[in-house]
Image (cartoon, rainbow, N blue to C red):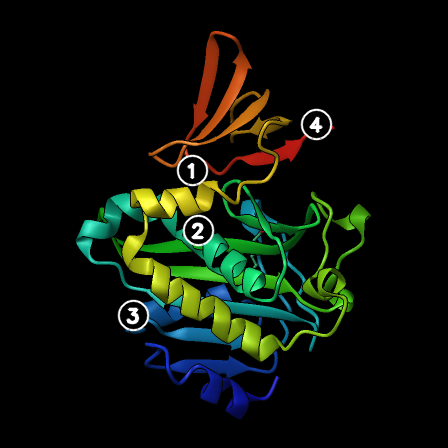
Amino acid sequence: MNENTLRASLAHLPIPELRFFESAGSTNDLALKWIETGAPDGGLVVANAQTAGRGRMNRSWVTLPDSALAFSLVLRPAEEYAEKLPFYAPLAGLAVSLALENLGLAPEIKWPNDVLLNRRKVCGILVEAVWNGSQPAGLVIGIGVNVAPSSVPPDGEVMYPAGCVEQALGKPADRTELLASILTHLFDQRPAVGSPSFIQAWDSRLAFRGELVRVEPPGQPAQTGILQGIDQEGCLVLRRDENNVLKISAGDVARLRPLV
Ligand code: BTN
């Protein structure tokens, strides 16, 4: 990834400062530290490779050089956005999905925010907040996208089977263009985060609808049921039997997988 080309591709976006690294530990760690020293809203950290990338639930996330996207966007939400915090990871999932749709692909969102192509995970999202008392001082939206086949970890090394954009596309993809497209969609959708139209856009891309799935909310027993969709609060709705519907909040970091 060429830094100058990247800067030119992002010039139309509200990104006041870009920090680019050929190799970084974790772009999320760098962005979190940057918030403490005054990172602006829209500050962006991009790395061509990560040596200590982090995933959800304390897992590691591997980013090999020249093969993937790894970046972290700083958002400094105003106080009124506090109750919308659970929607920022889905906002990123929606932005990645819209960018992949622009390439002619048919992504699906594995609730709450993993992006799948052909039922394989191609994108993971890790949103972290810095708090100032009870108010969020800033958010880091970390996005990792497997682009080239060399970015795909073997099935035995991941919790959920992984794939990549180029496998689905059948040809090489331009990482810089994809990054610019994801961020363009993210800034476009940002004003609508949490709104009915936003939830509808998220719900319409939901993977495994009508299928039997298993959800493991943290610290609670695993739940199985037929996946119905996402309700107006952003909860995942599972039907367990005729009279029993279960709702799981998007704020709970739950693990979801199909059972068949
Ligand atoms: C997941 O577990 O699915 C989330 C993976 C998030 C990975 C991205 S890569 C860019 C950013 N930096 C990190 O250390 N993690 C996120």
Q: Is residue 116 left or right of residue 244?
A: right
Task: Point out the image quarter for the C terminus.
Answer: top right
Residue annotated with mark 4: 259
Local packing at callout 2 (Cα closer than 10 Å; few below 14, some 14-19, many 20+) is many
- Whichever of callouts 4 and 2 sits on the residue coming sooner in the sequence is 2
Task: Mark 3 and mark 1 in contact? Answer it, CB < 8 Å.
Answer: no
Residue annotated with mark 1: 250
Q: Nearer the viewer, residue 34 or 190?
A: 190
Ligand 1 has an atom within 8 Å of the beta carbon of the residue at disc 1: no
- Whichever of callouts 3 and 1 sits on the residue coming sooner in the sequence is 3
Residue annotated with mark 2: 89
Q: CA distance from mark 3 to mark 4?
A: 41 Å
- Whichever of callouts 1 and 2 sits on the residue coming sooner in the sequence is 2
Query: Which quadrant holds residue 75?
Result: bottom left
Q: Position of residue 106 (x, y in %)?
A: 62, 53
Task: Please give the label number shown on residue 41.
Answer: 3
